[in-house]
Image (cartoon, rainbow, N blue to C red):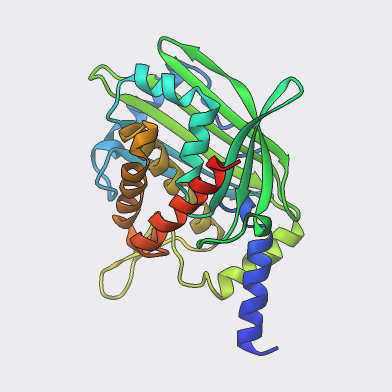
Amino acid sequence: MKHSTFRRLALWLFMLFLPALVPVVALAQSQALGSAEAMQAKHAAVKPQLAQNAFGRPLALESKEASGQLSGRIFAVLNHPFSEVSASLSQPAVWCDVLMLHLNTKYCAVRPSGDVTQLDVAEGRKFDQPLSQAQRINFVWHAPKVSPDYLAVSLTAETGPMSTHDYDIDLEATPLPDGKTFIHLGYSYGYGTAARIAMLAYLKTLGADKVGFTSTGKDASGQPEYVGGMLGVVERNTMRYYLAIDAYMERPAKAQLSERLAIWFDNTERYARQLHEVEKQDYLAMKRNEYKRMSSE
């Protein structure tokens, strides 16, 4: 098979189950710490990493691959009081605005399904495309846990395209004494043979130069080297969704959509080695079209 043909096949396979690699996802088993006390203890444990790291912001990132599952976790500080964070992120419609910041999210709507609230999400390519070409995942919105010092939000989906399964997002938050908020974002999913084959094909071609954020050492010239492969995929998308939460909290109003989009893009460009995909004007135009399409329903 010619190399160009192989590249096209890899791209087709990758896009066929792209939602498994992009959104909102976590382990079949929740990664949540479970309480304000546990969150405060974790904050104390990672405080040195939050104060000094390569991200230029108070953030710690972890990733793991085991037994057909990939997971990413971010612990970070938001420059917003807990009351604002809790009031916003406890609402399912807000999560649609968060998810829509990602390049690959083409559509999101909150829909009732019997006694369950769902987020109907469509994922696609990194450019403007018909919604009919996107892949759908229906996430169950679980009733959030809300108290004066703790917020826990969870979205899950049992199945996805190809052999992917057990999608989930866990978001936890607790107040800090300085009027800021400590958050934990957990993201993971399970995958089977078909998904793994397609991902490996992508990583050998279009994704061959992609890296994550965890340093694995330095090269001969003293420059940092980063984890690649499937862990790199998880780390990139975990970071994209953390930055989406941060951008939403910076500009939460509906009238501030353009500013929110610009903030998210500019913040991803701070990590261009890992996250750069398209030019800013193309991203903004694509997102404006996607929001216009959703508002015309």
The image shows residue 290, relative to residue 204, as above or below, that is above
The residue that appears at 29% across and 26% down in the rendered structure is: 80
| Location of the C terminus (image quadrant) | top right
Left or right: 91 as drawn, with respect to 27? left
Question: In terms of image quadrants, where is residue 250?
Answer: top left
- Tell me residue 274's x, y (percent): 39, 60
The image shows residue 147, relative to residue 50, as above or below, that is above
Pick out the residue farthest to the bottom: 2
Closer to the camera, 297 or 32?
297
The image shows residue 236, relative to residue 203, as above or below, that is above
The residue that appears at 51% across and 25% down in the rendered structure is: 33
> Can residue 53 be seen at all in this image of the molecule?
yes
- Tell me residue 249's x, y (percent): 35, 32
| Location of the N terminus (image quadrant) | bottom right
- Tell me residue 39's x, y (percent): 42, 22
Question: In terms of image quadrants, where is residue 247?
Answer: top left
Counting labels gives 0
Left or right: 254 as drawn, with respect to 28? left
Closer to the camera, 247 or 144?
247
Pick out the residue farthest to the front: 296
- Tell me residue 257's x, y (percent): 37, 41
Left or right: 234 as drawn, with respect to 18? left
> Can residue 25 be seen at all in this image of the molecule?
no
The residue that appears at 50% across and 42% down in the rendered structure is: 99
The residue that appears at 63% across and 24% down in the rendered structure is: 142
